[in-house]
Image (cartoon, rainbow, N blue to C red):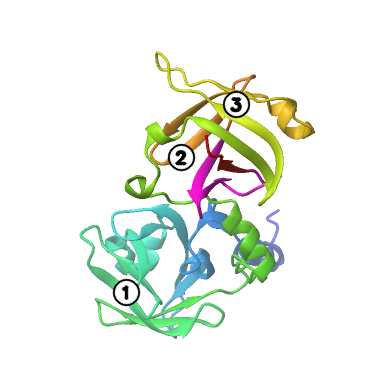
Amino acid sequence: MRIAAPAVLPLLTAGLLASATALHAQTAPPPRGVERAPDAVRPLLGAWDLEQPGASRACTVTFSVEPAVTGHRLRFPATCRRALPILNDAMDWGTGPNGRPRLFDPRGQVVIDFRDGTAERGFTGTGTDGKAYELNAKNHPRAARRPVQSPAELAATAAQRRTAVDPALAPAAETLPGRYAMMRQSGREACLLMLGASAAGNAPARFEGSCQDTGLTIFDPVGWRYAAGRLALVARRGHSIELVFEDGQWRKDPAVGAPLLLRKLAD
């Protein structure tokens, strides 16, 4: 006896629709490297639904941070080329003068130019095929904008950077040997340091007398070197501290941790 199948079809159809809905609901996380991306492109990174208004076909494309010939690499499933044939020509993405996204072909020519919209609301544009296209964020997560730093945070960040030095304006190497006051604060001597003349490529350094600064005695400078306007004190264990010349004295650079100043004393 043959069993009628029509009653099974609605269940099968419902299962397929549920599976399709679940797949569509999946979202991709922001691409790797987003934390190092420039602020100008950071809000655009990640997945977008690329659609034609009024059409049923759509595709999920990903704006990656990976550098490419023109801007950054554009990624999407191979099936997108059938759903949206214009993607056969698309390889990279970048931004136009207005800061909005563009899709480029391998020669760097614009394939879709999105002229209106925002990263929060999505974008609309026109392709080289004359058709309209939309970029919709839907539920895809976007990379968060970097928080505005406070003046104290900006100062701390700046202190961690090495100071640019013009070697032409720095003291000549032959003027460096001599006696120096080592200071934690300008005008308050902590220890005396002797920088000796270079001998066979080695320039010695040593304390003159006792030093009461625990941090400096632990560092225990035994040598120094000078290159590109930067003075480096070498510790007994081999590590070093760099200093730059400012306002008639040497300052530790970058200016992180305990401060250190050197002022050359008259002979």
Q: Could you classify mark 2 by the number of other residues whose Cα lies within 10 Å: few (under 14), some (14-19), or many (20 or more)?
A: many
Q: Sequence-wise, which precedes: disc 2 or disc 3?
A: 2
**The magenta stretch spans residue 258:** yes
Q: Are marks 2 and 1 in contact (CB under 8 Å)?
A: no
What residue is at 54 percent from the left and 48 percent from the top?
249
Residue farthest toward the top in the current orientation of the protein: 200
What residue is at 47 percent from the left and 30 percent from the top?
177
Element class at badge 2: strand
Report the disc number at residue 230. 2
Q: In whole angstroms, how far apart are the C-alphas of marks 2 and 3?
A: 15 Å
- Seen in the image, is 181 located left or right of residue 214? left
Amino acid residing under circle 3: His
What residue is at 50 percent from the left and 67 percent from the top?
39
Q: Sequence-wise, which precedes: disc 1 or disc 3?
A: 1
In the image shown, does 172 or 133 lie closer to the viewer?
Answer: 172
Q: Sequence-wise, which precedes: disc 2 or disc 1?
A: 1
The residue pinned by badge 1 equals 112
The magenta segment is 241-260
In the image shown, does 77 or 17 lie closer to the viewer?
Answer: 77
Total count of labels: 3
In the image shown, does 142 or 147 lie closer to the viewer?
Answer: 147
The residue pinned by badge 3 equals 239
Amino acid residing under circle 1: Ile
